[in-house]
Amino acid sequence: MGPTKEPSTYEQQLGNLGEVLETLRNKGDTNLLIETTLAYVKQNFAADYELCWIGLYDHAEHRLFGKGGYTPDGKHSEWLKQRHNLASGDIMEQVVVQRHSLAIADLRQELRAGEWRKVADRYSIQAVTFFPLIQRDRCIGVMLLGSKRWGTFPSNNEKACIRMVLGTLAATLSNVELEWQRQQYKRPDKPLMEMLNRLRNLPQLGQRLDAAVEETHRYFGATRTSIYWFEPKQRYFWRRVSNQTKTSGFMDMTTPASGLTAQELSSFYQALVSDQVVSIGEARSSLKADSTTRLMQLMKARSLLAAPILYQSELLGFMAIEGAEPRIWQEEEKQFLRAAAQTIALTAPAEEIEGIIHQTQVDSS
């Protein structure tokens, strides 16, 4: 038998590739994922590319958070973990927005490189390649690979390996984020039980409404949480309780809060009467466009979640979460508000509720 042939560099990279892909799929910690990726890149590419950096993209702040890397001198540097703001027209923003890799022959001479020119000067880096981390057409980060030699870029085979690793990294990072969101899921059962127990121990309806608003506001953390009561004679809604101002007397009738008349907001009123939760958020509304615009003008809000307070099919009012900013309402949030509104109706003193229902029936006859 002849001598065993040593595997080529590319064959070694393929073998290492399979191992790192398997490892990345099975890890659930962001730091470990980044460390695993950097270890693979360093093992397979450090001979030609002395600098590597990985940053994760913060969509809300439009900047990259450094998660680590390696440098030519092998020393840990603080800039590897620094935040990097993205400026319009610079190279890094181009990579994030266009979601395509980008090669620069000499980063030190690139005017659009911004603060990265200082990094290149510090480590005598010339050629760099920027690789975006893409998951479902969304950029979640960037990897920079730099060489001290002018115009030195990864081959097609090397780029294919790198993209497979970064693609798996991006997919796993997205799964980690989804799992974190799932763990942060606002379970409505516990706070609802706490609310119910608290309301049962309060003797007056006004106190119960105040407590319901307080507990609901704690759950949502919105700009304002309010209870609007319906005046059947004049057919308008008035703000009875808010986390900002409270009114306790049951018959403390005031002028229509924000001018919320049933006639002007007929579709909103009909939705409440039909026991529907009305949600208006970022680019979404359960009402028609004209009704949505007018309602939000009157409420002086940019997002709204409203649940009817119904007792024996009679509309007593509604509970509202009013936001100063656009918001995407989650299904569990809608369920919580509906349950909170139902709790208000069920815990109100029966004789007062019956009086309201009787007055409503008289007015509508």
Image (tube, helix red, strand yellow):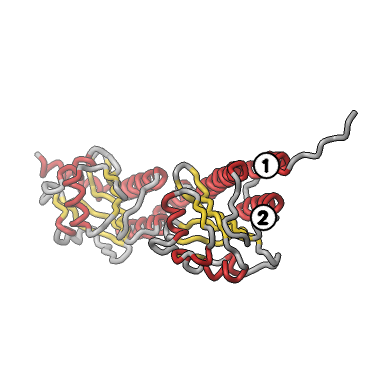
Q: Is residue 361 visible?
A: yes
Q: Which mark is residue 17?
A: 1
**Residue position for label 2:** 48
Q: Earlier in the sequence, mark 1 or mark 2?
A: 1
Q: Quadrant of the C terminus?
A: top left
Q: Residue at x 57, y 44 (%)?
A: 163
Q: Nearer the viewer, residue 42 or 208?
A: 42
In this rendered view, identify the residue nearer to me: 293 or 65: 65
In screen coordinates, is 61 left or right of 314?
A: right
Q: Is residue 182 visible?
A: no
Image position, residue 49 (x, y; %):
64, 56
Q: Residues within 10 Å of mark 2 (few under 14, many from 20)?
A: some
Question: Residue flagged by tag 2: what amino acid is it?
Answer: Asp
Residue that lies at the very extreme toward the right in this rendered image: 1
Distance between the Cα atoms at labels 1 and 2?
Answer: 18 Å
**In the image, is 316 to the left or to the right of 46?**
left
